[in-house]
Amino acid sequence: IFGTLRGLADVVIAGAETVRQEGYRPARAREAFAERRAAAGQGPAPAVAVVTGSLDLDFSLPLFTEPLVPTLVVTAAGAPADRIEAARKAGADVVIAGDGTRVDPERVVRELAARGLRR
């Protein structure tokens, strides 16, 4: 089921702890969904969005170094500036979706939708 969901999605959202514990990797292009994704105007694979208030992530992981599309790091305005810079240097697209150190789920949805990531 997860393979099918990823095959149809614009973006896969994961929490930072899940990324750390599972050694998350970039989403892959799946031949079974290539035609459908192309017809829907989607790229070959969904983006991955990692939600984190602290940005306590290993930016040398393949999720950040080998994605087909840049990984999004969704955080709040009060996140550590040095970690935001580290994410950007790793090629991540940093999305601010909250005030202070808390990420606001409704803002996450709005910010992703503004980037065309609605599914």
Image (cartoon, rainbow, N blue to C red):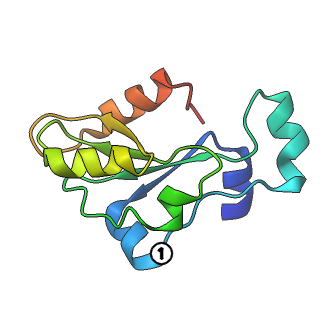
65 relative to 81, above or below: below
Q: Is residue 27 above or below residue 38?
A: below
Is residue 44 rendered to the left or right of residue 32? Answer: left
Q: Which residue is mark 1?
A: 23
Q: Secondary structure at mark 1?
A: loop
- Which residue is pictured at 68% across the width and 53% down the height? 5
Instruction: Judge from the rendering whether residue 81 lies leftward or rightward of residue 10; answer left or right.
Output: left
Query: In the rendering, at what x and y percent does residue 33 appear?
Result: 84, 48
- Residue located farthest toward the top when viewing the structure as drawn: 114
Instruction: Check the image and report above or below for 23 versus 96.
Output: below
Q: Specify whether residue 68 is in view.
A: yes
Q: Position of residue 48 (x, y in %)?
A: 52, 50
Is residue 1 visible in the rendered image? The answer is no
On the rendered structure, is 76 left or right of 2? left
Q: Nearer the viewer, residue 5 or 33?
A: 33
- Identified at 35% across, 43% down, the residue is 88
Quadrant location of the N terminus in the rendered image? bottom right
Residue 35 % position (x, y): 90, 40
Nearest the eye: 61 or 114: 61
